[in-house]
């Protein structure tokens, strides 16, 4: 086997099946880091992240000024609307002097918008455009987290309204407190004494990075319509903040050397650079979200690979493990669980569990319980045969014709014989017997 083939096999197979619990120290950290980097790189190479980033750039262009107008109006109610300019200037700092021009033009345009004279239709359009930006961000992050269902319309209204009304106030308040602390007389006197002065100055330089990490962490934690662990959101937020700082330095150097763009695009050069930085910014945010997802679901890439290759063995094991877990709670008299809770119980990504739950609901094996909310069995486990479960997993739809060909009668007889043998071997085995006779398979057995 050539060196290239070995490397490819390691990155696509060996890296994901090795027992990470048996590793220690730097070796374990190195494997985890390599998994995160490689999984995120594969998503980008499959044209998923860059396509989503391009869609967000388009939505941002349509919603940028209306969103700032709504934010400006909210901040004006608290008499802190002047603080929006430094925040925008900081975001566009890599554009250099052109960033300052864009900031000045946008602020001037937004400050002249009179929300009160727009009328009901105008205000509704302004709010809808703002809503569409936040909704697009949620949809994109849900896709990264493999979440099939977004928020309900009621939750969208309340959650998005909170983001628009509370978010800008908190950000500006945090920046204002930071500035006031730095200019405080007591702090200035402490700076004069070493090493306290050095530590305070270093902390002041790190504070923008900390705030940026906190902002990204907040987005990754609360925007996706699923349960995101704080540690995973923090890893994704720190990753995005580091990439943002590095990309900002690199892009600023690029802008300095981009005099040719001005010669080619003339007055449009500033627009081209703005679009380019907007695209890079969204790619960084999505990469951070991808890192957070793979940190929380380190086996997701491997399981997605198995599903992409139509591994029926994997699907069958996942369905049976899922049903045994539900049947065990039924026998014990425990409350039903939601798909996200079931995913945590069997250590699998939520998207895979939701897909399997939907399939089993279509085939009349599972159902959604309203009170108490959760996933339950349609009938007692002693009435659900294992053969029915396997048949449901192998069929794409609950009903549909089975194609048979006269010229392939020998093949049909062979497959029918196999199916009869499997049915006879599993005759009498139900979910009830699985619960009583066997322990629940581990996540490693599912992925074997």
Image (spheres, rainbow, N blue to C red):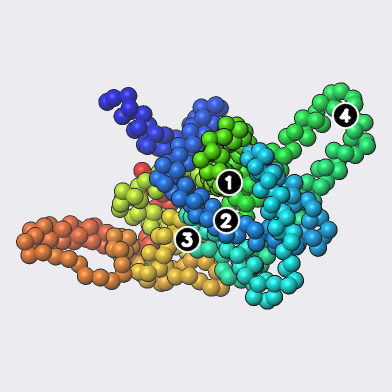
Residue with the mark numbered 4: 191
Q: Residue at x 45, y 43 (%)?
A: 44
Question: Picture quarter containing residue 429?
Answer: bottom left
Residue with the mark numbered 3: 148
Residue 61 got which mark? 2
In this view, the residue in front, 74 or 345, is 74
Q: Residue at x 69, y 48 (%)?
A: 103
Mark 2 lies on a secondary structure that is helix
Disc 3 vs disc 1: Cβ atoms closer than 8 Å?
no
Where is residue 157 drawn, in percent x and y?
63, 68
In this view, the residue in front, 2 or 96, is 96
Q: CA distance from mark 4 to mark 3?
A: 52 Å
Classify 10 Å Cα crowding around label 1: few (below 14), some (14-19), many (20 and above): few
Nearer the viewer's eye, disc 3 or disc 1?
Answer: 1
Residue with the mark numbered 1: 267
Q: CA distance from mark 2 to mark 4?
A: 43 Å
């Amino acid at each position: 086997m050539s060196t290239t083939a070995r490397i490819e096999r390691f990155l696509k197979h060996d890296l994901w099946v090795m027992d990470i619990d048996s590793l220690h120290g730097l070796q374990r950290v190195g494997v985890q880091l390599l998994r995160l980097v490689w999984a995120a790189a594969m998503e980008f190479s499959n044209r998923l992240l860059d396509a989503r980033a391009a869609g967000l750039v388009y939505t941002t262009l349509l919603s940028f000024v209306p969103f700032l107008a709504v934010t400006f109006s909210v901040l004006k109610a608290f008499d802190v609307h002047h603080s929006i300019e430094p925040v925008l200037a900081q975001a566009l700092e890599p554009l250099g002097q052109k960033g300052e021009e864009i900031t000045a033009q946008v602020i001037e345009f937004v400050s002249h918008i009179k929300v009160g004279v727009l009328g009901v239709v105008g205000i509704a359009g302004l709010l809808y455009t703002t809503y569409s930006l936040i909704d697009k961000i949620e949809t994109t992050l849900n896709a990264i987290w493999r979440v099939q269902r977004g928020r309900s319309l009621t939750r969208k209204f309340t959650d998005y309204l909170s983001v628009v009304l509370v978010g800008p106030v908190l950000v500006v308040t945090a920046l204002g407190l930071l500035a006031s602390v730095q200019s405080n007389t007591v702090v200035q006197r402490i700076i004069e004494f070493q090493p306290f002065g050095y530590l305070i100055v270093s902390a002041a330089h790190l504070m923008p990075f900390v705030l940026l990490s906190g902002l990204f962490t907040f987005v990754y934690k609360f925007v996706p319509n699923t349960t995101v662990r704080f540690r995973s959101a923090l890893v994704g937020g720190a990753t995005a903040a580091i990439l943002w700082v590095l990309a900002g330095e690199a892009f600023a150097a690029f802008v300095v050397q981009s005099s040719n763009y001005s010669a080619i695009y003339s007055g449009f050069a500033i627009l081209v650079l703005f679009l380019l930085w907007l695209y890079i910014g969204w790619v960084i945010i999505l990469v951070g979200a991808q890192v957070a997802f793979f940190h929380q679901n380190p086996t997701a890439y491997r399981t997605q690979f198995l599903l992409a290759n139509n591994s029926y063995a994997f699907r069958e094991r996942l369905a049976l493990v899922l049903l045994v877990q539900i049947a065990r709670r039924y026998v014990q008299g425990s409350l039903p669980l939601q798909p996200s809770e079931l995913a945590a119980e069997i250590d699998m990504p939520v998207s895979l569990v939701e897909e399997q739950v939907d399939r089993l609901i279509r085939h009349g094996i599972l159902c959604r319980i309203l009170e108490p909310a959760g996933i339950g069995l349609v009938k007692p486990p002693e009435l659900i045969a294992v053969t029915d479960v396997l048949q449901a997993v192998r069929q794409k739809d609950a009903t549909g014709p089975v194609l048979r060909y006269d010229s392939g009668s020998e093949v049909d007889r062979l497959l029918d014989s196999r199916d009869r043998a499997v049915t006879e071997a599993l005759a009498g085995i139900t979910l009830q017997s699985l619960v009583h006779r066997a322990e629940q398979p581990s996540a490693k057995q599912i992925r074997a």
